[in-house]
Amino acid sequence: MGWIGCADLAEAEQRDIAAVPSTVFAGGFPVPGAQEPDTPHGARTDCRAPRRRRMTAPHPGGTAGRGLSTEFVGTGPSIGLLHGFTQTGRSWGRFGELLASHRQLCCVDLPGHGAAAEVRWGLDRTADELAGRGPMDWLGYSLGGRHALTLAVRHPTAVRSLVLIGATPGLETDEERVERRAADAELARKIRRIGVEAFLDEWLRGPLFAGLPDDAAGRSERLRNTVDGLAASLELAGTGAQIPVWDRLADLAMPVLLVTGSLDTKFTDIARRMAELVPDVRHVVIADAGHAAHLERPEAVAESVLEFLARPRT
């Protein structure tokens, strides 16, 4: 079975999709005890909202013959979801459940994460692969926001609309990028030195996640990641590796929604600056939420995203 893009799902459902027992998005899923049918080698399973259907799709290319893996959740128009650093395509929690009630979610494992742990691609190469999946709405959080914005800049016709949660167009000076690349490299060395579990303990205690409840952090799902995968993601797609695109924001023709938490002052300030440059933009600040606003206040963020996606298109 070749790669099936989200745009081809309706036709594929007629021959390739079977009903499966219910699983739900939790901090990381599948839910313990949920049973899944056998699937072909390399296929992904159990990314379904309650009483939904599931399909798996192998992907071309990539390191050691592997590419990006995607799970499909829900029904309705398609939206691609790109997760944050140390997460996977299964890390959307209650927010993902709410979206899946109205949309078909294409949940991607980004390079270095989940089933794409062995993929070694930077932002540009990943954007080129994602663009081949056909025009759709795209949503990215943090690391995923860097990927989604790179996709929108490099392949604007592949992005019907763009939702960015806690994202940045990049560091603006050479000095900042050199300093950040050094910090990202040191963090990568630390992961290799202490391992994923100890690193996650420190990462989730950091200021970015001060307001994130343990049950929403999805730690068990994050533990599926590997030392080498996470380290490579930092080195190839970290903020220090990102080419700044501030000067390209005015060229974005698609509708753009920027979401930040009110407690995440750094990214709220960045989003305000972005909103002055993007032609068709809305910036929503979620009260009493930090960097992971969609995990801390899933209902509020889902409401804003669904309202944005439902608005008439010209």
Image (cartoon, rainbow, N blue to C red):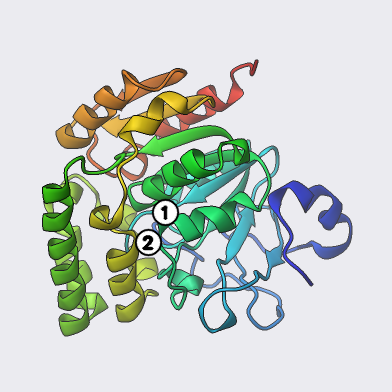
In this view of the protein, can residue 95 be seen by the observer? no
Amino acid of disc 1: His
Please state, as top left, top right, bottom left or bottom right, where the C terminus lies in the image: top right
Left or right side of 17 for 147: left
- Rendered view: 14 above or below 64: above
147 and 81: which is toward the camera: 147
Q: Is residue 203 visible?
A: yes
Residue 38 vs 255, above or below: the answer is below
Q: Which residue is mark 1?
A: 83
Of the 4 image quadrants, the one containing the N terminus is bottom right
Q: At x 65% / y 74%, what residue is drawn?
A: 43
Residue 177 point in image, percent of width and height: 18, 52
Q: Amino acid at mark 2?
A: Gln
Q: SS of the residue at dot 2?
A: loop
Q: Residues within 10 Å of mark 1 (few under 14, many from 20)?
A: many
Find numbered disc 1 in the image and state the secondary structure of the residue it sits on: loop
Q: Are marks 2 and 1 in contact (CB under 8 Å)?
A: yes
Q: Which is more toward the observer, 270 or 113? A: 270
Q: Which residue is mark 2?
A: 87
Residue at 49% x, 59% y is 126
